[in-house]
Amino acid sequence: MFISVVIPAYNEEKYLGRCLWALSNQNYPRSRYEVIVVDNGSTDSTAEIARSYGARVIRERRKGIARARQRGAQAARGEIIAFTDADTAVPPHWLARIAAHFAADPSLGGVYGPVYFSDGRPHEKLIMKYPVTWMLALSNRVKRTCCAGSNFAVRKDAFWKIGGFNGFDGTGLMGEDVYLSLRLSRVTKIIFDPELAVYTSARRAREGYLNFLRRSAVSTARVTLLKRPPLPAPDIR
């Protein structure tokens, strides 16, 4: 099956090359996937780097990660849309494992996995590898799926059945993944695969633990309970 990988990017020249290198070294046939980088108004060399790796560059000038992901999904040619982030590196088997899940179960609408830190301090890595991963897995078991935006894939038909990110306030910089996965889990089957792990930057930790945890908790409550947009995240590069 053909897979479209969508990557939202705003001034990501520092990280994007590593992300695209990993995607160009998949053990999945290159003819069976495309990489779409959605340039969300960058002022650096994000677009040039994307093109140098053979990615399609789509522009979305309205700021907001939900808007960027939605624009990428609109441009996607694949029957499966896989989402990751510009500061994230996926393993060589990422696309093959995603494809295998969807091929094995025609009723499957989505799959997601853990997100680990590739840098940062030892205790930060442990928090992502254990408590955060346990939370992601548990949410799926209790039918309140919360996936991570840097590591999930959806069947295109299921994505558009709920309108994708339509209805989400695009000004928010976080929470769009929770918004989508909660709505998607009401109409289709989603699974958590603990072996489908990706590695992302720990730069968000530089926001400060208390600030990050407070904003994450409040944003999750706003999105899941109040149906309101999340709190904006600081622009950390």
Image: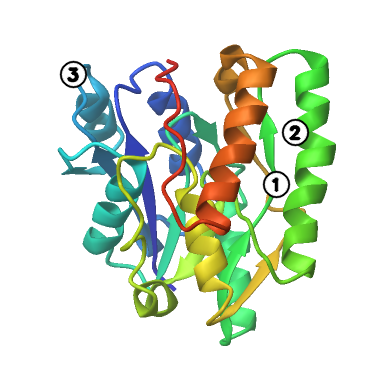
Tell which circle, 1 or 2, labels the residue nearer the N-terminal end: 1
Residue at (24, 62) in percent of width and height: 74
Q: Amino acid at mark 1?
A: Pro
**CA gap, disc 2 and disc 3:** 31 Å
Residue 235 image-quadrant placement: top left
**On the image, numbered disc 2 is attached to which residue?**
128
**On the image, numbered disc 3 is attached to which residue?**
43
Say which of 202 and 53 sits in front: 202
Q: Amino acid at mark 3?
A: Thr
**CA gap, disc 1 and disc 2:** 8 Å
Asked if one can make out residue 6 in the rendered structure from this viewpoint, the answer is yes
Contact between marks 1 and 2 (CB within 8 A): the answer is yes
**On the image, numbered disc 1 is attached to which residue?**
114
Q: Amino acid at mark 2?
A: Met
Asked if one can make out residue 28 in the rendered structure from this viewpoint, the answer is no
Relative side of 116 to 163, left or right: right
When the figure is inspected, residue 221 is found, relative to residue 161, above or below; the finding is above
Tell which circle, 3 or 1, labels the residue nearer the N-terminal end: 3
Tell which circle, 2 or 3, labels the residue nearer the N-terminal end: 3
Residue 201, horizontal then vertical, whole percent: 57, 24
Residue 7, horizontal then vertical, whole percent: 37, 43
When the figure is inspected, residue 218 is found, relative to residue 5, above or below; the finding is above
The secondary element bearing badge 1 is classed as: loop
The secondary element bearing badge 2 is classed as: helix
